[in-house]
Amino acid sequence: MDSSALSTSQSASSFRPTRRPSTSARRPSTATHRPPPPPRPLTHDEALDSLRAFLKERSSYDVFPVSFRLIVLDTHLKVKKALDVMLLYGVVSAPLWNTAAAQFAGMFTVQDVIHLIQYYYQSSSWEGATADVEQFRLQSIRDIEKILHVPPPPLLYVHPLRPLYDACRYLIRTHARRLPLIDKDPQTGGEVVISVLTQYRVLKFIAMNCRDITQYLTASVHQLGIGTYVSPNPDPESTNKFYPLATATMKTTVFDVVHLFSEQGISAVPIVDDQGKVLNLYETVDVITLVRNGAYTSLDLTIAQALKQRAVDFPGVVTCSPNDSLSAIFSLIKIRRVHRLVVVAGQDDPKPGRLVGVISLSDIMRALIGSDVPLGSAGVGAKVVDKVLREEGEDEVFATSEGTRSGGTSMEG
């Protein structure tokens, strides 16, 4: 066995932490997470207040089942092998671990793969870039960001016993899609990666435990202003008929869509026909398969061609109508994995199935938690995070240096 293969089995590990967070008591059973049913019917605002109170009483660690798997990637691992591990275990991101420093080193996400593709296509020597990409190690990703003039992602994390409400607020205010849970070993003082809190996990936790409350969220998503909807384009010369949404057709090239992912900080693009009817959805996770198979060398594939390489277990596009209630959305999240909803016109519309809007999990979480920071689509940016940290007086701030770990930014318990 060569050293790189050995690195995969050792560094890209799948494990369950052998201990609970350092200051936690015995973990309560899942049944105790359910709040008592309200004594009377609730208004929409009362239901929101009840959900927020529920989140304030639960820790970030409570979201996770008693037994779960965690994938951690060593920064010395080659990118291609890291992608193999992620596809094997069905994950789209993973914490990074610096073995030499024995500390958390950030996250490896699909956005990093997008940066790899951009680097490849901007290189003057395709052959040289191909060889580089094949040999890239995860620790080299930040070097690519410097070449592309991409701001490095700040290291954000939260203590696992921090109230879940605080973690959700932190996710919203930093525009992050995920938040690692980092604890300290009481014996050694070293860091321990407990897991990664995602928007989906939080919303699934609410859907599973708070049905007696979410049933009162009967207002429609459109009434509540949840999501981004097709609006009149202020630029009369623009050809985007679905402003401000980004869309593609079956004839659009994969690279053009990848450019949209990077430029607009989005994770999926609806695929529409000439009439605006939604045919499919191309997601950033689809790019992982292409890069893993070496197809980044031919990203002039059309979306129609690329979709043929998609895994057969793709669950399909999750859609809703503007008139669906927030309660119905939670009922859907309870029974299936949802990362976004494409809003389409109903059967009573002259053009049923046409694209109306897109609802992200960030939109849903913001509607629940509330935020005075508008949700954007640019991902986590250093300026946004700096603004948040100046306002969050209770946060313990460490130094970060262009994405290279010299501390981090945390919300300690």
Image (cartoon, rainbow, N blue to C red):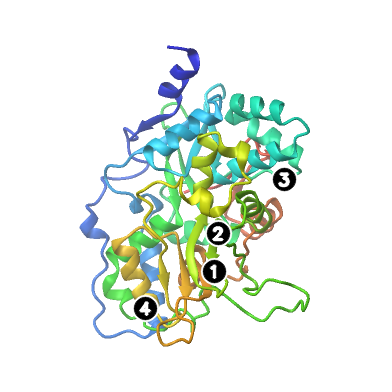
Look at discs 2 and 3 and give the one toward the viewer.
2
Residue 127 versus residue 50: which sits nearer the camera? Answer: 127
Residue 288 drawn at (x, y percent): 51, 42
Q: Secondary structure at mark 4?
A: helix
Q: Secondary structure at mark 1?
A: loop
How much space separates mark 1 and mark 4, taking CA atoms?
40 Å
How much space separates mark 3 and mark 4, taking CA atoms?
41 Å
Rate crowding at label 2 as few (under 14), some (14 to 19) or many (20 or more) other CA atoms within 10 Å. Answer: some
Residue type indicated by callout 3: Val
Cβ atoms under marks 1 and 3 closer than 8 Å: no
Residue 49 drawn at (x, y percent): 41, 76
Cβ atoms under marks 2 and 3 closer than 8 Å: no
Q: Quadrant of residue 183?
A: top left
**Disc marking residue 250:** 2
How much space separates mark 1 and mark 3, taking CA atoms?
33 Å
Rate crowding at label 3 as few (under 14), some (14 to 19) or many (20 or more) other CA atoms within 10 Å. Answer: some
How much space separates mark 2 and mark 3, taking CA atoms?
29 Å
